[in-house]
Amino acid sequence: MIQFNIPPVTGNEQQYVLKTLQSTKMSGDGFYGRMCQEWFEDALSTSKTLLTPSCTAALEMAALLIDIQPGDEVIMPSYTFVSTANAFALRGAKIVFVDIRPDTMNIDENLIEAAITSKTKAIVPVHYAGVGCEMDVIMEIADRHNLVVVEDAAQGMMSQYKGKPLGSIGHLGAFSFHETKNYTSGGEGGLLIVNDKRFSERAEIIREKGTNRSQFIRGQVDKYTWVDIGSSYLPSEFQAAFLWGQLEKAEEINANRLNTWGKYSEAFKNLEEQGLVDLPVVPKYCDHNAHMFYLKLKSIEERTDFIEHLKAKDISSVFHYIPLHSSPAGKKYSCFFGQDIYTTRESERLVRLPMFYGMSEEIVGKVIDGVVGYFK
């Protein structure tokens, strides 16, 4: 069976993890933790980055940093992973969903402003498939209404919007290093990106269980104590060591995935011209990272048949999110502003093909043959 995903391994991860095992520092913010954070601060040109145990943890930290209170409202797309909503719902926020664009599957920037009320606290754009949302418009709206923008760039590492790295445009951002992402820190992991310096100091405190431990270690304070609310958002040094092995080969991983993505796109162009499928749309001002390659079929019934066809050919393919507003928890903690014109319809058409670092030409060819064979 051709797997849908195989976690990336570049070759150096094992030795770095072993060095950590043999060291006296296994908790977070050791040698590899600092190396990773410095790499991201340089690559993103941002004031501070903090490794976290997951992207979920990074988003939860963002909710704490912007002081989400019960009754606050947070605007986001319904077509996203549950963590995007959970992070803010945990603080008592009401989640306000708006429709997506049918081309990129990202939040429709033209629907955000109408959903803003006196209770709105933040906008959370989600960069689906590593393709940037319309961030210029979103930031302008946020500025006019004095709102915070938290970029859910879980799938967006190495992607850019108008030359700016995803995650570095909003006030805060978050990456994921889960094993299904382009880069992993050993199965789980995340990064909080702090672009607004007013959040920098408190981000460290929240991450260290509400203590000033980081300031104490740097000699900035003479006592290590509890100063704010927080939690344990510090990943182990093992996670950082594994991630460092990936960051050393970040460009190589990116180029390899883009090459596979390009082969898929070229092979299926004729199917799109015949009106049989829709291919992913990448706006000309966006540089994506080939996080996923998907096709959109005519209906959920055709998609189900298509997945079964590929399964019979020993090829794994999967659909993606069930819109959150239609879920049991979504009905309790959220509302959908306006009409659901595209969110449900487009989600039911989408199917993802195998995509991972190091896919051989043989495997890519078999997937292409399987897809083309369905329409024959």
Image (cartoon, helix red, strand yellow):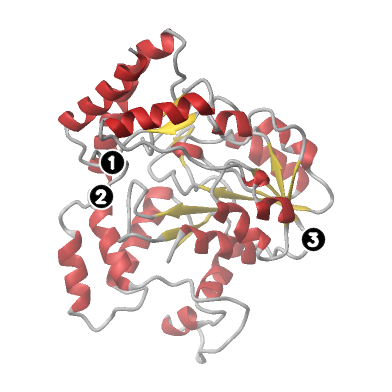
- Three-letter code for the amino acid on which mark 3 is drawn: Gly
Q: Is residue 127 left or right of residue 267?
A: right
Whole-angstrom CA distance, mark 3 to mark 2, is 41 Å
Asked where in the image residue 25 lies, by quadrant, the reply is: bottom left
Q: Give me the residue at 46% from left, 49% from top.
A: 154
Q: Which numbered mark, 1 or 3, is in the foreground of this view?
A: 1
In percent of width and height, residue 32 lies at 28, 67
Q: Which residue is mark 2?
A: 8
| Secondary structure of the residue carrying numbered label 2 | loop
Q: Classify mark 3: helix, strand or loop.
A: loop
* Residue 21 visible: yes
| CB within 8 Å, label 1 to label 3 | no
Vertical order, 178 against 125 (above or below): below
Task: Return the mark for residue 71.
Answer: 3
The answer to whether residue 282 is seen in the rendering is: no
Question: Could you tell me how many numbered marks the image carries?
Answer: 3
Spot the residue most to the bottom: 223
Q: Considering only order in the chain, which callout, 1 or 2, is on the residue closer to the N terminus?
A: 2
Q: Of 95 and 113, which appears nearest the observer? A: 95
Looking at the image, tell me whether mark 3 or mark 2 is earlier in sequence order: 2
Residue, x 51% and y 27% (percent of image)? 301
Disc 1: which residue: 356
Q: Position of residue 171 (x, y in %)?
A: 59, 52
State how far apart marks 1 and 3 are (Cα). Answer: 41 Å
**188 to 128, vertically: above or below:** below
